[in-house]
């Protein structure tokens, strides 16, 4: 924990006055301790750096809500950053990112496909002809064109939710056809 100094009250007043130089001083004084707290929670340097930056922005933007009568400045900023770090590890994006790992890091052995293997022989592309034109277009772009759902949404000028709904509906239809 950073030492309490006589200048803390002055720093608080300068931050309330939106003094950017005070924010630099604040960062120099508290960032290492805050980073340590965040790092213990998220356990990844890149994530910890992102959370620290997000925390600094949040502290700057919401400094008016700091009440010195309820606790020290460090306690307040530590709670802001700790809560952001906890929110980060609870987020779906973080959980999915920690479960998947790059192929080069995985234990999976990559072997080239047999030269006689031809994906089109499976007949999936022919089965997509039985989908509605909207579903077929989305499936073609996603699975045969290599697009992401966001890229399909941008390309077709559709909301992302619509692309996801069409893909999900198409998969249901295709799974029934395969059985």
Image: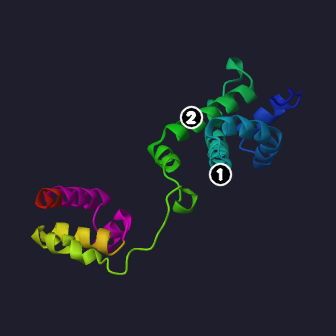
- Which residue is situated farthest in the right direction here? 6
Residue at 20%, 74% (x, y): give it.
125
Q: Which residue is mark 1?
A: 46
Quadrant of residue 120 within the rendered picture? bottom left
Q: Report the span colored magenta.
A: 147-173
Residue at 62%, 48% (x, y): give it.
47
Q: Please tell me which residue lies in front, 80 or 116.
A: 116
Residue at disc 1, secondary structure: helix
* On-image quarter of the C terminus: bottom left
Q: Please tell me which residue lies in front, 50 or 64.
A: 50
Residue 162 at x, y = what percent? 24, 59
**Magenta span contains residue 156:** yes
The crowding category of the residue bearing disc 2, from other C-alpha atoms within 10 Å (few below 14, some 14 to 19, many at least 20), is some
Residue at disc 2, secondary structure: helix
Above or below for 96 versus 2: below
Q: Is residue 84 left or right of residue 137?
A: right
């Amino acid at each position: 924990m950073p030492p309490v100094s006589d200048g803390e009250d002055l720093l608080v007043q300068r931050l309330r006055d939106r003094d950017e130089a005070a924010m630099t001083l604040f960062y120099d004084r508290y960032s290492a301790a805050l980073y340590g707290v965040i790092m213990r929670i998220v356990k990844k340097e890149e994530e910890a750096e992102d959370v620290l930056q997000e925390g600094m922005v949040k502290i700057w933007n919401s400094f008016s809500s700091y009440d010195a009568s309820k606790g020290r400045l460090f306690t307040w900023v530590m709670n802001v950053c700790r809560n952001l770090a906890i929110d980060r590890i609870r987020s779906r994006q973080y959980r999915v990112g920690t479960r998947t790992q790059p192929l080069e890091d995985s234990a999976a052995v990559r072997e080239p496909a047999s030269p006689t293997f031809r994906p089109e022989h499976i007949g999936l592309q022919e089965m997509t002809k039985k989908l509605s034109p909207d579903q077929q277009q989305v499936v073609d772009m996603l699975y045969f064109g290599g697009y992401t759902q966001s890229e399909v949404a941008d390309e077709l000028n559709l909301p992302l939710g619509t692309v996801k709904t069409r893909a999900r509906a198409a998969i249901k239809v295709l799974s029934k056809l395969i059985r």
